Image (spheres, rainbow, N blue to C red):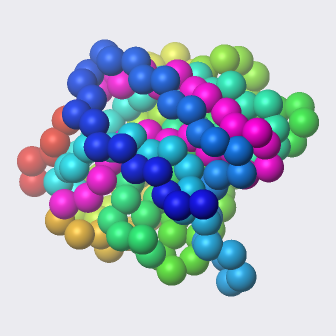
Amino acid sequence: MEKKFIKYDYRNNETLTIESDRHTDFYFSETDRHLSGEFIYQNCEKNFTIIAEVCPNCSQIYDAAGIMVWGTDNTWTKFVIEKIDEESLNVVSMVTNEFSDDVVGERFKGKAIFLKIEAKNNFFQFSYSHDDKLYIKHRKFYLKLPDVLKLGFISQSPNGDGTRAEIKIIGFSHNKI
């Protein structure tokens, strides 16, 4: 299945509904390459801060929704809420530089969580919050990306029949270095 990228100039305080088809994913391993989820993005310079409230409707294991930063087909990162098992949702991040890694974070109960990405000169910090006040650092890393990248929102359903998510853009700004 081909990747489904949709360019869209989203705005602060806007709520987007993102739906993915069945068997869609963003993931690279030694044997598999998947670039087939729904991705709504806008072009962006690489220094930015974005905060979004993510309310996923994950019914199957590995259904996910959240924020993606896209450099090239081989270099990208995502910060999502993902159904890891039958009972819970987790904060999950992935960094892809030829191959993908997974970092599974806090398990949470509830309908929504706030995800925040801060990017400066190829250094990224991912944080999350239950109330948009106190943010907990999930991970910090370096990933070399082009000066102009794609920044936006994804949904995926690798094992299921599709999923949808409501994502509210709380804040987006370009950071001046």
Give 45 or 73, whichever is nearer the viewer. 73
Residue lying furthest bottom in this view?
Answer: 30
Q: Place residue 103 in its image quadrant.
A: bottom right
- In the displayed orientation, state which residue is furthest to the front: 1
State left or right for residue 137 relative to residue 10.
right
User: Where does the C terminus fall, quadrant-wise?
Assistant: bottom left
Q: Is residue 177 visible?
A: yes
Q: Position of residue 21 (x, y in %)?
A: 64, 42
Q: Is residue 70 magenta?
A: no
Q: Residue furthest left?
A: 176
Q: Is residue 26 visible?
A: no
Residue 134 x/y as whole percent: 48, 24
- When the figure is inspected, residue 34 is found, relative to residue 133, above or below; the finding is below
Magenta-highlighted stretch: main secondary structure?
strand
Quadrant for the N terminus in the image:
bottom right
Q: Which residue appears at 51% of the width and 31% of the height?
A: 18
Looking at the image, which residue is at 44% across and 39% down?
A: 153
The residue located at (79%, 31%) in the rendering is 59
At x 36%, y 25%, the residue is 169
Where 144 falls versus 91 (above or below)? below
- Up the image or down, 120 lies above or below 109; here it is below
Picture coordinates of residue 84, whole percent (x, y) = 79, 44
Magenta residue span: 148-172
